[in-house]
């Protein structure tokens, strides 16, 4: 008998060789129906693989990322099988699961392309294969045999992958007539797949390198229930309407010009206003929490990034060094603000009484992304972080974490993100030598994060081994209005940079000590955050934030002057107002401006002109009656003030 420890720490005994499915059956019939894969001592594996000695296990279902990964990765194999049958001679690259589904990179036979109609045929074939409920079988193979197999099959991409593997670790998975080189894990059989959709075709270089051949990437998604596919398709329709690239264009928020460069968004006047309001808001919050704003340049000496270690990551494989014409100096576009802030900390001697020092900057950084990876505001080559670095004593770490969590909560509340979770990334306790910093500090930091999250009642998951080598961290995930998850801000402890930059403070004992550094960016970046915000609100920003709060609509040309007077009056009180004096019917003007998601429309004509009043329409609520200019001004100002004061206090 072997001992199987379940996640609740209960222990059950089974015969050696028991598999995950049998364990699930022993727990409950329903679980056995739902379970997709298993982790055995932290390694995710096939459900049907025998367990031969004592182990800690966790069973994964559709509710778990690991479960969905297994499901979708298996689906990639089934798609490959369908494609191989449909287009014999296709060669296969890699086929991983992704956040929403899976893809497979394939090299189509000479002269062949894929159309919508082909995708439909492949979908049909996949459903047929699913209905056969073929077992997906794992086998181990020697490197030599694996090479032989794929050479015979004529699959050069697989041969290349195999040649890089270590003998003794190579596995194959087979279902029906299809065999793939794969680490797994996979579903027990193809019958788990009840509904599917192939969603997209794109080009992708083999292994992401422009030097290699361009392959065809086929994307798809599958589900264990038909209903889940239907829900997904409705969600995709809604997501399309909320696409930040579409709304960004309609609302004139930002643009990307191929002339300026790919992945380098430019903010149009209204988008710049949106950003300015967000920055102002966060600066105000940070001021209350004792932050100091700093400003640093967009480039830095290569030596700085060699010292910080960033050169290794952002040097050769990112934007290249900038050289001065004669002095032989070398600079790098700033990939991170941290080294600059470390130098600011070193500007003068610091005492324990000066700590924490909290340096904040809306710092623009540049990182190379492959052109195929670029996407709207979410994957770009230049972006502005709402960055700050906190230099504190080890005993202040928890307090500082609590405060940063408070700031994150204020932001979520302000922008109506009601649904969020956080991931605590800790070190792998069985691999401690991988990490920099003393055991004692790590334990203290990890405990601080866990306690701070618990005190704030934050819903968290903890991942062992996910910490960076230089410190543990906390990442926030939000769900938007249509239930999609986005990763936003990060709070990261760092023992490495203070070491590399030899940062010190004089302690109460008159001795030199190392401060701990915290990196934090609650928005993440302004670009990414604005994208999430646009998709979350569908462009209907809260009134305090929206770039145009009021549009004045004269009924006819005769009242353009009065409309301008109203607009000037409101702008003088910092109410962002414009006039729509186009020569259009009033009904059309109302519709157009409602489409533009303007919170307040003011209609002015004969009566309003004579009595110095405005007829008010509110977004989504229609006609609100007629009020004097002064009344309207005070109404808006108090609406904005009450929202903001509730947030700050
Ligand atoms: Zn695979
Ligand atoms: Zn940093």
Image (tube, rainbow, N blue to C red):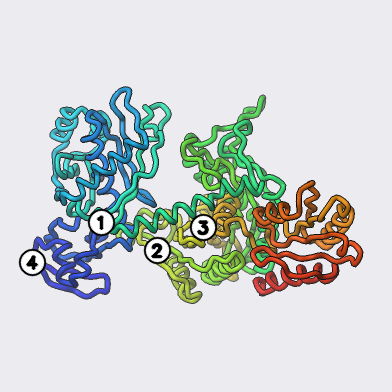
Proximity of marks 1 and 3: CB atoms separated by less than 8 Å: no
Quadrant, the C terminus: bottom right
Using residue 423 as the reference point, say whether residue 131 is left or right of it: left
Proximity of marks 4 and 2: CB atoms separated by less than 8 Å: no
Return the residue nearer the eye: 314 or 258: 258
The residue where tag 4 is placed is 15
Residue 120 location (% of width, % of height): 31, 41
Mark closest to the chain's N terminus, 1 or 3: 1
Instruction: Give the quadrant of residue 421.
Output: bottom left
The alpha-carbon separation of the residues under discs 4 and 2 comes to: 39 Å
The alpha-carbon separation of the residues under discs 3 and 2 comes to: 29 Å
Instruction: Give the quadrant of residue 543.
Output: bottom right
The residue where tag 1 is placed is 44
Question: Depth-wise, is mark 4 or mark 2 nearer the camera?
Answer: 4
**Residue at position x 15%, y 32% in the image:** 149
Question: Depth-wise, is mark 3 or mark 4 nearer the camera?
Answer: 3
The residue where tag 2 is placed is 439
> In this orientation, does residue 293 appear?
no
Mark closest to the chain's N terminus, 1 or 2: 1
* Residue 329 versus residue 173 in the image, above or below: above
Mark closest to the chain's N terminus, 3 or 2: 2
Question: Depth-wise, is mark 3 or mark 2 nearer the camera?
Answer: 3
The alpha-carbon separation of the residues under discs 3 and 4 comes to: 45 Å
The alpha-carbon separation of the residues under discs 4 and 1 comes to: 21 Å
Q: Which mark is residue 488?
A: 3
Secondary structure at numbered mark 1: strand
């Amino acid at each position: 008998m072997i001992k199987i420890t379940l996640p609740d720490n209960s222990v059950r005994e089974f015969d050696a060789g028991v598999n995950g499915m049998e364990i699930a059956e022993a727990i409950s019939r329903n679980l056995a129906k739902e379970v997709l894969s298993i982790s055995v001592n932290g390694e995710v594996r096939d459900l049907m693989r025998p367990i031969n000695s004592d182990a800690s296990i966790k069973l994964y279902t559709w509710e778990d990322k690991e479960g969905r990964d297994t499901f979708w990765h298996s689906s990639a194999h089934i798609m490959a099988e369908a494609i191989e049958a449909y287009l014999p001679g296709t060669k296969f690259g890699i086929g991983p699961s992704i956040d929403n589904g899976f893809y497979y990179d394939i090299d189509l036979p000479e002269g062949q392309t894929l159309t919508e109609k082909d995708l439909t045929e492949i979908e049909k074939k996949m459903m047929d294969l699913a209905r056969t409920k073929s077992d997906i079988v794992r086998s181990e193979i020697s490197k030599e045999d694996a090479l032989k197999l794929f050479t015979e099959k004529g699959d050069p991409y697989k041969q290349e992958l195999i040649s890089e593997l270590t003998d003794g670790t190579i596995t194959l998975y087979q279902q029906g007539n299809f065999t793939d080189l794969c680490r797994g894990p996979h579903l027990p059989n193809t019958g788990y797949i009840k509904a599917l959709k192939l969603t997209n075709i794109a080009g992708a270089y083999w292994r992401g390198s422009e030097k290699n051949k361009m392959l065809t990437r086929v994307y798809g998604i599958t589900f264990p229930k038909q209903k889940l596919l239907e829900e997904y398709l409705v969600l995709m329709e809604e997501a399309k309407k909320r696409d930040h690239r579409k709304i960004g264009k309609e609302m004139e928020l930002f643009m990307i010009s191929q002339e300026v460069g790919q992945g380098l968004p430019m903010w149009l006047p209204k988008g710049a206003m949106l950003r300015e309001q967000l920055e102002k808001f966060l600066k105000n919050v940070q001021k209350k929490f004792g932050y100091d704003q700093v400003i640093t340049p967009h480039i830095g000496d290569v030596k700085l990034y060699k010292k910080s270690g960033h050169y290794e990551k952002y040097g050769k494989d990112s934007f290249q060094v900038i050289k001065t014409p004669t002095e032989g100096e070398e600079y790098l576009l700033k990939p991170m603000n941290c080294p600059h802030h470390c130098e600011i900390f070193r500007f003068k001697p610091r005492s324990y009484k000066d700590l924490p020092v909290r340096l904040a900057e809306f710092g623009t950084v540049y990182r190379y992304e492959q052109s195929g990876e670029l996407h709207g505001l979410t994957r770009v080559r230049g972006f502005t972080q709402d960055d700050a670095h906190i230099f504190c004593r080890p005993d202040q770490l928890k307090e500082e974490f609590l405060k940063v969590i408070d700031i994150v909560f204020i932001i979520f509340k302000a922008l109506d993100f009601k649904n969020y979770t956080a991931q605590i990334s800790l070190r792998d306790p069985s691999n401690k030598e991988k990490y920099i910093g003393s055991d004692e500090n790590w334990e203290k930091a990890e405990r601080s994060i866990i306690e701070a999250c618990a005190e704030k009642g934050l819903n968290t998951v903890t991942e062992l081994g996910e910490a960076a080598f230089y410190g543990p961290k906390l990442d926030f995930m939000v769900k938007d209005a249509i239930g999609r998850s986005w990763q936003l801000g990060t709070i990261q402890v760092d023992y490495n940079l203070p070491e590399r930059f030899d940062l010190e403070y004089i302690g109460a004992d008159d001795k030199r000590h190392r401060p701990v550094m915290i990196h934090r960016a609650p928005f993440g970046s302004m670009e990414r955050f604005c994208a999430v915000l646009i998709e979350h609100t569908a462009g209907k920003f809260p009134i305090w934030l929206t770039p145009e709060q009021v549009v004045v609509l004269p009924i006819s040309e005769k009242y353009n002057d009065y409309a301008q007077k109203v607009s000037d009056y409101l702008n003088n009180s910092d109410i962002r107002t414009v006039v729509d004096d186009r020569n259009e019917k009033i009904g059309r003007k109302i519709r157009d401006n409602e489409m533009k998601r303007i919170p307040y429309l003011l209609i002015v004509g004969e009566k309003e002109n004579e009595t110095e009043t405005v007829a008010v329409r509110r977004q989504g609520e229609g006609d609100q009656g007629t009020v004097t200019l002064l009344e309207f001004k005070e109404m808006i100002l108090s609406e904005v003030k009450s929202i903001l004061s509730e947030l700050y206090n």
